[in-house]
Image: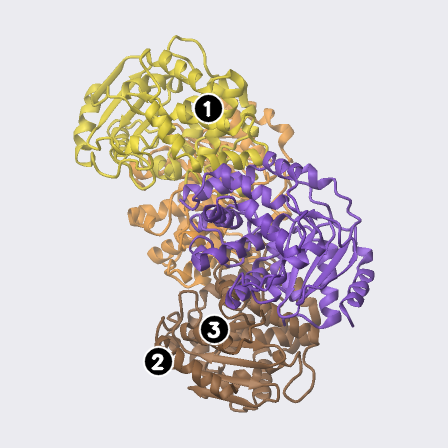
Chain colours: A orange, B yellow, C purple, D brown
């Protein structure tokens, strides 16, 4: 079966689950999204992209941005970041301070909020403008110069940002931030606010299927580094449900509370699925179901 | 490069790390093992097996047994076991009671001790003799009728078994054991005491590479179930270092404090490496290094 | 106002709260108690005792026994016990394993279950029969030779004793028990099962008001030790509600899930109140209310 | 023995412990204090005050201020504050976020930092200038119009205030602050910076011995409220060592990392002791020893 055919079978199969779950409520700008949307795209190794449903509709990438900022730091700085953030699953909710206290301000992995703040902090140090650096990269990889921040979301995040401010100050109290807390928070909120479609994200994540090669053939990450990002996605990419995601889907994946999930089949393709209704752990209900169907249908799990 | 060649390159590369780390100290029978040993074996899809070093030397399988007892329960009982044990990484040391208390007696996954006790309890209910059922299965898959329990190890575990007794009584207090605590502990200690070589374990784990098919061609697990066991191994198989193992090695793997590690390349082969010196998280130092070299050399990571 | 008058005023004032809350449910023998009972007694420094309501009705002392076993250990062994158990409030539910794990098997105080098991273990080592030693002491102090264990309660505790068994094995794994787990549990369950009335307990706790002097004028504890037991009662005596008890009642007190509470006004008298309905933290609803009224009425709080 | 005589005996007895422990290091302004100082004062019910050593030397009150801000809130607002802060000992270090997360942003008591921030927040709402209100009150009670903030300390706290900022933002994320985080932090840091001597503090805490009456005879707190503040001091006033303080000293007390401790003997007198060397839990080594000696010498423990 070809990609387009597979996407259509999957979309039909999960139709009844679209609209299930709950749209993210913690900021008004996300709570207003229509839950009945669903899109899915696949980008192959050549950069050809296939899609179904609302696959060209932009949505808020939210935590999916964490994968890209991690890759940009690894590309510039190598493995030094692992002195400041771990790569173990957290066993706690994604914004938990408990773990951070027991481990003295070193977040367990780069995909919990605390860890992503450290990565953004480092990217800010390295580039002097973390969020713009990220946006430029995403525009280039997705070949979409129209990608943009969503100021309403970024400001809404800022207004409701006490939990992230607590995380950032807490790490600062352990000396694990290089930039002022407000600077780090600002870039973090702006990076999360970027709007992209399934098409855009499937293309932008292509370097993870291409073992580190960018869309233009240049190398972003070494083969070893690309493998490492995929490994961290698989063990830590879907909040406190990473074990279940590996169990059901069997692919490296990174979800966001905007309802998107990027998943990678190394050496073959990158997928992005989007549907705003979230399960209790913050992952798209129809999105996880679609990836489950896709890997079952194609047999392309990494396991 | 062929398997035998790869094994010899790897063995040479990690020679300096053999003997590093610390042999498991918690029971005398394990503390007496010579740390300077190293063996590694690969079994391919046809059941042909290749080895290097002390690959035919039996050692105590310890927690590696947890993979097999899980598979035997899934084979008999399907997914019902997941009502009683989770499949998320724990974020805590492998024998932690903390997590168990916060989650009301449901262990996070089947590879922490609490979870393995639940699996053994279920296998006992299903077979009326969990440890013998497991031994018979391992003998058949490894084609080695001489496999046996090590009574000295089992008794030593029993004598130093207060931590596991605490876990078992604690779960019993939540109604999450079907059999009496002493029965469950006994079968658990005996299953951990089984002695096998790298050769035996590479063969016995062949069904995980063969998508669920046993050595005799019969089906133990469905393709989906085999994928699921591999996924749980990858996210939870190496104690509180699963993220790092995925990052370095990029394969599903299950370690034991006897110094062995079984790893799976789905559709290709099963590996077993053994060297008794452990890192601070309980995984074989030279064993992890060897698997890291092997996947780098061959490019056969799942990522 | 005299003691008898104060008791009658208090009993009338709390009448509407008798029967509120919930009788302890965790063992059948306690769940069958009539919730509508209420008794209260005061024993003065001369050993004269006054009472109201069901003050001569025996009930299960449960955790109140912990105060007496602590005193008996201090009397024989001095402050050595504080090497094995702390004296800080726990900040957790009374049977929590979490704290025990973070503090390496040393319970926070002698009144959480883990701490009481350590005290019983020590009393067993010192006397070779901890529960009988305790019973003999209570008979002597209350001048009531008919005091007895309740075998139905002790056996019921044993049958439902997995949580305490977990605590005991867990401490044993840290080397913090001197006797075998089953021995310690047995004496602990029997000591909790002793049946006493408010009259009996007010008399038996007289040494805490008399700065360490027994009913016969002999010295059990030094003045300093008696002060210390009172201090530990005040900070740790009513499970996770000790702060609130100090705030409302302002006296050292020790409660049990049988619905009894012993409280001490140093230099003046010992009180015991009983009513089986418990609040969500395991303290008698009408009992706490009665002590609150009593101290407000008399102005005899320690604060 | 009279107060002056008792103070001199105590001062002699603890001389060898003066200078032990470690001066608070977390801000430079405190780290520079000479550890070899010791002072102690007693104020009786009439407002007569006795002292020994450096009892007229001002020092940074730090957390001792928490007692006074709590009293000022209770005086204006009654028991409403207990909806926003508990009164149970914390069982954790005084600035722990762990407890705060498990209890959804409601601090366990008003003397851990999180709880004190809530109290300051409420005082700010009630008075529109929390720190000045507190300073005015302390000037009046101590009859010392020269009491003042220490700007160097307040600014140093602000510069090293990430941990408290984390606590404040974290509570804000649960909706448990009424004022902006920077406002609350500012008033909190300024209140902690007030400099007072043992003489000043013994007089200022007189209302706690006088069952709520101020120095001028006016009523600040009801008798019941005064009792409640004393109870909370006893169970929560000395960080994670409250149980031990009750055990050794047997008085309600509140310590600060400046090395001061205020203690109350209800109906008799208020004490203040000061010596900058702290034990590992943040309480003055010589200060605790002096109070221990004082209560042993006089027999005036509440137990």
Residue A130 at x, y = what percent?
Answer: 40, 54
Quadrant housing residue C186: top right
Q: Which mark identifies residue D292?
A: 3
Residue linked to disc 1: B70
Helix, strand or loop status at disc 2: loop
Residue linked to disc 2: D36
Mark positioned earlier in the residue sequence (3 or 2): 2
Q: CA distance from mark 1 to mark 3?
A: 59 Å
Disc 2 to disc 1: CB gap under 8 Å: no
How dense is the environment of label 2, judged by Cα within 10 Å: few (below 14), some, or many (20 and up)? some
Disc 1 to disc 3: CB gap under 8 Å: no
Query: Foreground residue, D28 or A21?
Result: D28
Q: Is residue C199 above or below residue B109?
A: below
**In this image, D42 relative to B31: left or right?**
right
Quadrant housing residue C292: bottom right
Chain at tag 1: B
Establish whether labels 1 and 3 are both on one chain. Answer: no
Q: CA distance from mark 3 to mark 2?
A: 19 Å
């Amino acid at each position: 079966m070809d990609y387009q055919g597979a996407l259509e079978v999957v979309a039909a199969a999960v139709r009844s689950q679209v609209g299930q779950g709950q749209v993210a409520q913690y900021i008004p700008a996300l709570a207003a999204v229509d839950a009945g949307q669903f899109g899915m795209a696949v980008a192959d190794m050549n950069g050809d992209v296939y899609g179904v449903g609302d696959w060209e509709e932009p949505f808020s990438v939210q935590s999916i941005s964490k994968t890209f900022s991690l890759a940009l730091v690894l590309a510039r700085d190598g493995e030094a970041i692992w002195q400041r953030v771990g790569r173990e699953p957290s066993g706690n909710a994604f914004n938990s301070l408990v773990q951070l206290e027991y481990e003295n301000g070193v977040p367990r992995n780069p995909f919990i909020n605390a860890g992503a703040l450290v990565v953004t902090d480092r990217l800010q140090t390295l580039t002097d403008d973390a969020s713009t650096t990220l946006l430029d990269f995403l525009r280039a990889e997705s070949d979409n110069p129209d990608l943009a921040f969503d100021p309403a979301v970024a400001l809404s995040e800022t207004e409701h940002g006490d939990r992230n401010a607590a995380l950032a100050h807490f790490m600062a109290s352990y000396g694990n931030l290089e930039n002022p807390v407000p600077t780090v928070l600002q870039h973090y909120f702006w990076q999360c606010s970027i709007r992209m479609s399934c098409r855009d994200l499937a293309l932008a994540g292509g370097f993870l299927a291409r073992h580190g090669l960018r869309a233009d053939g240049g190398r972003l990450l070494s083969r070893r580094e690309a493998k490492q990002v995929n490994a961290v996605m698989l063990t830590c990419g879907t909040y406190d449900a990473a074990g279940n995601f590996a169990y059901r889907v069997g692919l490296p994946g990174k979800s966001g509370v905007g309802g998107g999930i990027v998943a990678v089949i190394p050496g073959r393709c990158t997928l992005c699925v989007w549907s705003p209704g979230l399960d209790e752990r913050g992952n798209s209900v129809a999105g996880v179901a679609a990836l489950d169907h896709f890997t079952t249908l194609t047999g392309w799990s990494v396991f």
